[in-house]
Image: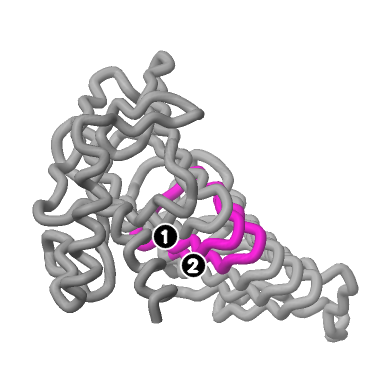
């Protein structure tokens, strides 16, 4: 029991207690792309104006909105005692200087704004990043993070390792890859500007496209199965069945258009008509 409480104490020292931390805001004037690397779960939302906003996500199970863990007063007492030891001191990191108040380093490189997570994975909790329309986004969740993006209508590049990539109400262009996590994407429309590529090694890929999408699709699964309610496999003129051994299916939607490439080594692929 003491060991469990000690673990809780350690985890709670990673989040603010007593008062919720104010969001960090950064002007995106002159910025066309945001590049973010962080080893945690993150949610991306579209916002109005011309500012990037970093805000904490859910603080912890059992906490109130301010991060107070009222059910364990002993734990809270120990956490506050630990925090008091650091009063007047500033956290420093080996990989850079925190200039956001979120344990992250922000640097501008021409028209690109780069954000690097300085905290180790054991000290990082989930957060929300809000970005206005007209700015493309590159996200790398490194080892264990998942990505949840809603309503993004600009170019997206997402890289994960074992995390879940979930993209809802997007248009593309999109390039997303993960090693062992699934990829779920729901398109409102499909941009014809650049190809769409979704790849994973062991996870499933589940994609929903509007029925009127113009696209040339290629679906590949080495050990999994491909499912779709689009008419992709055309019968041969001689009436015989199409038989292929390379687990690759190509098809044309509505006379063709942008290339949509979905590939999983061992997972299944689902291509749905909206």
Residue 146 at x, y = what percent? 46, 59
> Which of marks 2 and 1 precedes in the sequence?
1
Residue at 63% x, 62% y is 252
Residue 187 at x, y = what percent? 41, 61
Residue at 34% x, 37% y is 103
Q: What element carries label 1?
A: strand
Residue most extreme to the top: 110
Nearer the observer, 16 or 55: 16
Residue at 29% x, 30% y is 90
Nearer the observer, 243 or 109: 109
Residue 136 falls within the magenta-colored stretch: no
Left-right relation of 220 to 45: right
Left-right relation of 220 to 146: right
State how far apart marks 1 and 2 are (Cα): 6 Å
Say if residue 45 shows up in the picture. no
The residue range painted magenta reads 157-185
Q: In which quarter of the image is the N terminus?
A: bottom left
Say which mark, if any, is on residue 184.
Answer: 2
Say which mark, if any, is on residue 167.
Answer: 1
Q: Residue 54's image quarter?
A: top left
Marks 1,2: beta carbons within 8 A? yes
């Amino acid at each position: 029991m003491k060991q469990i409480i000690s673990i809780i104490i350690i985890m709670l020292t990673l989040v603010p207690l007593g008062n919720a931390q104010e969001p960090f805001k950064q002007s995106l004037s002159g910025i066309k792309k945001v590049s973010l690397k962080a080893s945690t779960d993150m949610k991306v939302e579209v916002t109005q104006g011309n500012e990037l906003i970093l805000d904490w996500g859910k603080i912890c199970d059992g906490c109130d909105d301010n991060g107070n863990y009222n059910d364990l007063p002993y734990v809270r007492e120990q956490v506050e005692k630990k925090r008091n030891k650091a009063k007047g001191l500033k956290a420093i990191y080996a990989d850079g200087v925190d200039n956001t108040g979120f344990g992250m380093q922000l640097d501008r490189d021409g028209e690109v704004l780069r954000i690097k997570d300085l905290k180790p994975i054991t000290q990082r909790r989930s957060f929300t990043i809000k970005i206005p329309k007209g700015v493309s986004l590159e996200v790398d969740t490194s080892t264990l993070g998942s990505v949840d993006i809603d309503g993004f209508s600009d170019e997206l590049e997402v890289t994960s390792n074992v995390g879940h990539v979930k993209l809802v109400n997007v248009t593309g262009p999109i390039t997303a890859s993960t090693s062992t996590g699934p990829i779920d994407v729901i398109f409102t429309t499909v941009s014809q500007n650049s190809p769409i590529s979704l790849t994973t090694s062991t996870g499933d890929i589940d994609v929903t496209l509007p029925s009127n999408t113009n696209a040339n699709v290629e679906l590949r699964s080495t050990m999994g199965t491909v499912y779709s309610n689009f008419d992709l496999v055309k019968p041969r003129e001689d009436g015989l069945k199409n038989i292929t051994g390379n687990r690759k299916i190509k098809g044309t939607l509505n006379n063709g258009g942008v290339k949509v490439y979905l590939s999983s080594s061992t997972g299944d692929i689902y291509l749905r008509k909206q």
